Image: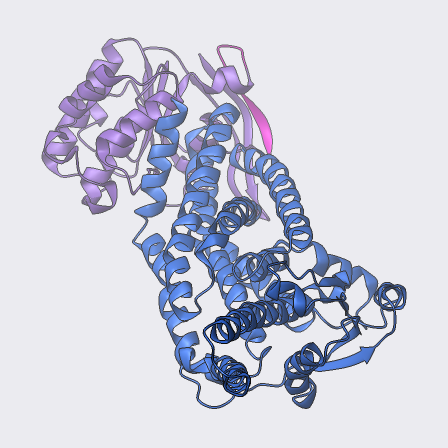
Chain colours: A blue, B purple
Amino acid sequence: MKPFTFILYDIKRLFGHGKTAILAMLSPIPVLLLFATFLVPFLTTDSGSKLSIALYNADSSEELAELVDMIIAPEVADGRVVIYPVNDTETGIKLVNEGKVAAFFYIPPNTYTDPMNGKRAAIEFYYSQEHAFESLLFYASAHSTLSVFGQGIRIVYLAADIALDKGVTAEDVITLWEEGSDELVDVHLHRGKIIGKSGVFSPGNDYYLRFLMAGLFAVCAYFVSFPIIYLTSLDISEIFGKRNTSKSNLAGFYFARLFSGTLLIMCAFLIMYPIARAIRRFPVSLALSVFPAMILTALAFSALAILIGAVFKNGHTSLWAGLYFGFVSILGVIFLMSNSSLPKFVSFLMEISPLRASVSIFSNALFTLVPERYFTDMFILLASFIVFTICGFFVYLKRGSKV
Amino acid sequence: MIEAKGLVKKYGKYVAVDNLSFNLDLGESVVLLGANGSGKSTLMGMLAMVLKPTEGEVLIDGQKGKKAKSKIAYAPQNIVLFEELTVTENLYAWSSLKGKENVDRADYLISELDMGSFKKKRVDRLSGGQRRRVNIAVAMMGNYDYLFLDEPLAGIDEYGGECIESLLRKEKESGRGILLTEHNPTILLPLMDRQLKLDGGHFIG
């Protein structure tokens, strides 16, 4: 059979199997909506676990010190973050390397004045792999706050400059400056209104929301792969063995299923993306980094689903196996990710888990982009895809041709 | 010629087929008769090489393995089809898996088994008898010397039975060996050269 016909028939089978594929693709929508309606307000007030951060502020300006305090104070007060001030970058990096803090923030000199002069402020950030999620989310939040303020302050500064040129008195300009700055702070602190939360919304308050949204992306994609698991197991147990299917034909079936499975998961992602964006308006400009993450996640999950379906020849058993595997992975990713007291082997498994890499890559790529972490996660997903494909291919051939 | 010697199939302690030997020549037709659980389908599965015998061996024209297997067209008792595809798509898919997509052969079988009225329907929307006919047609797509049909008339109406009978007559005339299983005497029996009765995994007549 021509490869294209193989793929076309398999897509037809997968998408037409008792409408389960369509249901699987659409099921993330109510999940995301329920998440937005009920969980978001709860998450944004939840204190969560503590994140230890070393901070070296080399900028001597009072305004920046106030701004940094404004970012950190609510985090510290809510028990999410513990700050360890240090006096040089070497100490900060050393603390990260020794595992004494999760991350190190370095604010270079002139960070406050650079944006006013049209320069880009370059904050440096170091984090440990074990705390990559929370550190990056905190960084994303702090970075976005500093960027917003940097731009806002520059506009206020320019406005004050123009006012001075137009002959406004120095007294009025100071008033304009102070009121402008206060308004900026007020608007930013109450930005929680966007998601229906009234009152002060502290700068880092939504990073658990970001993490969980990324988690939902990865988990929903994993559950969308269930029709792939079921149909694969059904093919192997009910069709191939009873129809004397040759190994070369099985290879064709395998790659057709890999492709159609990837397509199914990608469809779910493409449905989820605009909905997630409506809930939390992450930048569209980052779509270029989100889509490769989606494709690689879809490939890895599709290969994993075929492997599970091939190992467990009974359709229902394979579904239960997929459910248990997913359940353990989700527990591992969500609840154990920051637990440094785990045995090293378990921590390592968590670090290379494709589900974790998927959550990590979405939490990174949807909201901000730290290239270093992005490429690490891409590498883990690619390696998972290769391993699952090789293992799945041989198990599929062996089981499918078994007499 | 198909030669089977000392075939035994055990499922745990249960012996489904007990030391059976069997021959089938090209152009010959044989029916295996027996009640449910007598061992007919197990014996046919081993002869079709989709079931591994616990003991004994099957040779087809003196050969074993992949090449021997390709000489048999086998329609199992359970319907084995791509449920989400149409009748025509199933025929094309299975024919191309066995060689190249054979449109003429598909058209011939659709006509012989009177499947024209439902050829564009998805298999999971067909009746039991219609599915049975598709199951047989799928087995017959491709090149083969021996045709094995496990209970081909199960769930088939009188007209469907006549279609199958006419098709088998042509298969026999073309020199192919035919092996069927049935639990009751049917309209196909007059076509058969030999009848073998099974009970408890043994031939009883």
Question: In the rendered view, does B85 fall on the left or right side of A346?
Answer: left
Q: Is residue A177 left or right of residue B147?
A: right
Q: Quadrant of the N terminus of chain A?
A: top left
Is residue A288 depicted above or below A389 in this figure? below
Residue B185 visible in rendering: no
- Residue A186, image x and y in percent? 50, 85
Give the image quarter of residue B187: top left
- A154 displayed left or right of A134: left
Q: Main secondary structure of the magenta part?
A: strand
Query: Percent position (x, y) of residue B69?
Result: 47, 20
Answer with the quarter of the image where residue A362 lies.
bottom right
The image shows residue B13, relative to residue A317, as above or below, that is above
| A51 up-or-down from A79: above or below | above
Q: Residue at x 42, y 65 (%)?
A: A276
- Quick one: A368 or B164, which is closer to the camera? A368
Can you give x and y, in whole percent of width and height, for residue A275 in the image?
37, 64
Between residue A130 and residue A146, name the one nearer to us: A146
Rendered location of residue B147, percent (x, y): 34, 21
Magenta-drawn segment: B54-63
Residue at horizontal 12 percent and vertical 28 percent from the top: B114
Q: Is residue A80 left or right of residue B85?
A: right
